[in-house]
Image (spheres, coloured by chain):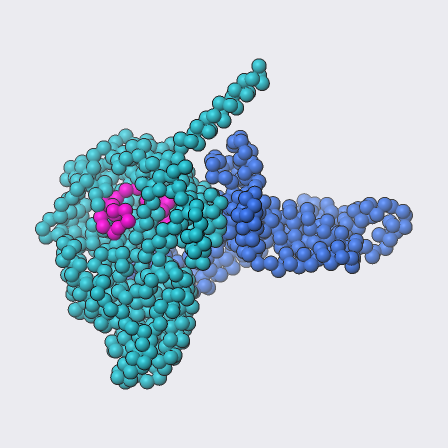
Amino acid sequence: MKRFAYLMATTALALGVALGAAEAKGLVYCAEGSPEGWDPALYTAGTTFDFSSQPVFNRLVEFTPGTTKTQPGLAESWEISPDGLEYTFHLRKGVKFHTTDFFTPTRDLNADDVIFSFDRQGNKDNPWYNYAGGNWEYYVGMSMPDLVKSWTKVDDYTVKLTLKSPNAPMLANLAMDFASIVSKEYADQLAKDGHMDDFNQKPVGTGPFIYVDYQKDAVARYKANPDYWAGKPKLDDLVIAVTPDAAVRVQKLKAGECDVIPYPNPADIEALKSDASLTVMQQEGLNVGYLAYNTLQKPFDDARVRKALNMAINKQAIIDAVFQGTGVAAKNPIPPTMWSYRQDTVDDPYDPDGAKKLLDEAGVKDLKMKVWAMPVQRPYNPNARRMAELIQADFAKVGVTAEIVSYEWGEYLKRGAAKDRDGALLQGWTGDNGDPDNFLNVLLGCDGIGGTNRAEWCNKEFDDLVKKAATISDQAERTKLYEQAQAIFKDQAPWATIAHSVITVPMAKKVQGFVMDPLGHHQFGNVDVTE
Amino acid sequence: MLGFLVRRVAVLIPTFIGVSLVAFIFIRLLPGDPIYVMSGERTLPPERYQELIHQYGFDQPIWKQYVVYVEQLAHGDLGTSINTKRPVLSEFMALFPATVELSLAAMLIAIVLGIPAGVIAAVKRGSILDHGLMSTALVGYSMPIFWWALLLIIVFAGWLGIAPVSGRIGLTYFFKPVTGFMLIDSLISGQKGAFQSAVSHLILPSIVLGTIPLAIIARQTRSAMLEVLNEDYVRTARAKGLPPSRVIGIHALRNALIPVVTTIGLQTGYLLTGAILTETIFSWPGIGKWMIDSISRRDYPAVQGGLVLIALVVMAVNLAVDLVYGLVNPRIRHVG
């Protein structure tokens, strides 16, 4: 009898497991790194966002999947005042924060949550301003303190944002990860219990997935949010496994231990494409790798010299050697996936003889210069040292002697930004919010000199166009201004634009509905798996 | 015995102070600072940079920073990681069990295979077996770890499909860690198949991590055995007509083991400092990768705290080795 009961119990258990397995849809995403923490406003790394802001949180405005355009998120609609200074957001009603084993919300999302989400980042008197080191890096990095005058609650479901000056990219900023809306009720509860640090360890959001557990540097687990305002996700469970080695990620994908992986080694991509059990998606990343001349120094203050050097660089050879098929030549300072990209731009031709002539014309003989090479791999440049060597060889062909210099990364960033930097610098940029302002103004505007403007290039005409574009909310009008600005850039050549890297996401065939995000996130809210 | 222990611990105190000072200075000698690395290409405005430097206290004179650090240390506070904004001690404790588990498994493989291999090579000195074993050991010693690891993964996980690629346990098993040791936690969880899954995940990384210690132990055992086998007492034992297994197993090996135990101790201490390559390749959440990441981010508190904790572990292991000597060889019994 005892034996029979045992048999029954095991059968029931096995049946339950089998049924459960058939019903529950799970997906394993093998991430390249670990989340630094779980409060998205404290960090700037895309890896961290894949764990926190993307599955767990929402923003007032969201990027339309696969684009850099914005669409309604937690705000159902909004109005912008004619002077561009006031944004009135109407919140979606009935949005529930996650119920977890550590928090049960008693009310829906309302204006207090929105105000709190931003106030804690900008208001030094907010008790949460200094929690977890009080480092609101992205909020500061996107100049929010200079742009925002106030956030006010109009009623429970209406909030008003007032700006100090009109700023068209603001909506895109509000779709960024740092602008994720957090629960004030949860924050209050933690503050009362004296566990404020848990706010950065156990996230509660409104997003498609509910945080379940995280084992440091190993694995994070989520379950579908049954009350998700945009509809319950098709997956029941999401697992993100930390897998730092690119070759191992590929092996795990092949072995079925991962369903989706980011950043495979370029050398593995061809083999992945020929594997019938996999789908390989590719798209240009929202980035640019460039060589910035120091336009404050002789002879690089002369556009002819810069143009000549650009013509000396055999760009395609560099891309083939350094990117191994995972890069495309860049002709504009903004990537092709970004709106206002100027299709008509003609790139500087590879023409060593022409380059020599142009240098002669500028009166430059036996030029000696430095080329700075980053010591680290970046999304826009997998091997700066190799790139610098190829540029050095190209320059030698037109009689220019280049010396390659490099520093440790932190030091490189510091010295590279200095106005009196000696030499041309290999660097690059990955877009934050998909707005052209985030490239053209940040990297080439006069305000960025001594900072993000590594060419130390200040062209009044260019700067005026870019500044003006930021104050207009009509995108068609802005596009025109940005196209003009790109034409000036190409003519003045403060950089040699080198490449935009191509991002590759391989996945198992059973994964359906994955959309590549130009901003580099990996999102699973609309993903399904078919067995 | 107790007196010996007290004396040894007393010697450790200045060592510990020295280590804390070195840890503090080492990370500051590296160029670049955490604030610049944190801001990346974005580059902070100078005012903001100053604000952050001030917030972290990096604008204080270096001696003052050291005083603050020592004061915290004296209260058992290792500071807060700049990167994760979590206490360094809890970060370390979350990862250290994984490192211990892997290191012990690797040392187990190294000892169980290394000592017999060394003994056999010594007894059959000059034979093909001896040459074969010692050449294998040399290859093991000089093999690039990442290559060896990937080779094992491709063969056993990829082609043969008999081992998992990486991780500590199958992702279908989910339970909260109790001890942090996956083998123990999987047993406690009571989930069917969890323990087997944990063991299967441990095998490849421990073979990889154990390869170099295995080679070292085998070579060391061989040379120690050769020395001992020529000693008078071994000859006497043989002359008495004792069976060879007893002569080699008891008389010779026990004495030969003294230098080997030293090596095992040093190797264990070394493995416990974290194996950066093995951890990275096998997605093993240990302290090796954490330390390297912290160094590259110039996360001063994490590096300082991590080094101090690792030093404590290594000192504890060395102390343990000293005590084990007495068990192996009665002549070195510690008199109090």
Residue depicted at x 51% and y 36%: B178
State the image quarter where residue B54 is shown.
Answer: bottom left
Position of A162 with respect to A355 (left or right) is: left
Nearer to the camera, A337 or B45: A337
Residue B142 drawn above or below residue A131: below
Q: Position of residue A387 (x, y in %)?
A: 40, 68
Position of A255 with respect to B123 (left or right) is: left
State the image quarter where residue A488 is shown.
Answer: bottom left
Nearer to the camera, B176 or A484: A484
Residue depicted at x 38% and y 79%: A397
Chain identifier of the cyan chain: A
Chain B image colour = blue
Residue A95 drawn above or below residue A429: above
Nearer to the camera, A515 or B17: A515
Q: How many marks?
A: 0
Is residue B191 one of those drawn in magenta? no
Position of B234 with respect to A281 (left or right) is: right
Q: Position of residue B188 (x, y in %)?
A: 54, 32
Residue B48 drawn above or below residue A212: below
Is residue A46 one of those drawn in magenta? yes
- The residue range painted magenta reads A42-70
Residue A237 drawn above or below residue B49: above
Instruction: Kindly tell me whether residue B99 is visible in this rendering.
Output: no
Residue depicted at x 64% and y 47%: B109
Q: Position of residue A23 (x, y in %)?
A: 40, 31
Q: Position of residue A82 (x, y in %)?
A: 9, 51
Quadrant of the drawing holding the N terminus of chain A: top right
Quadrant of the drawing holding the C terminus of chain A: top left
Residue depicted at x 27% and y 46%: A65
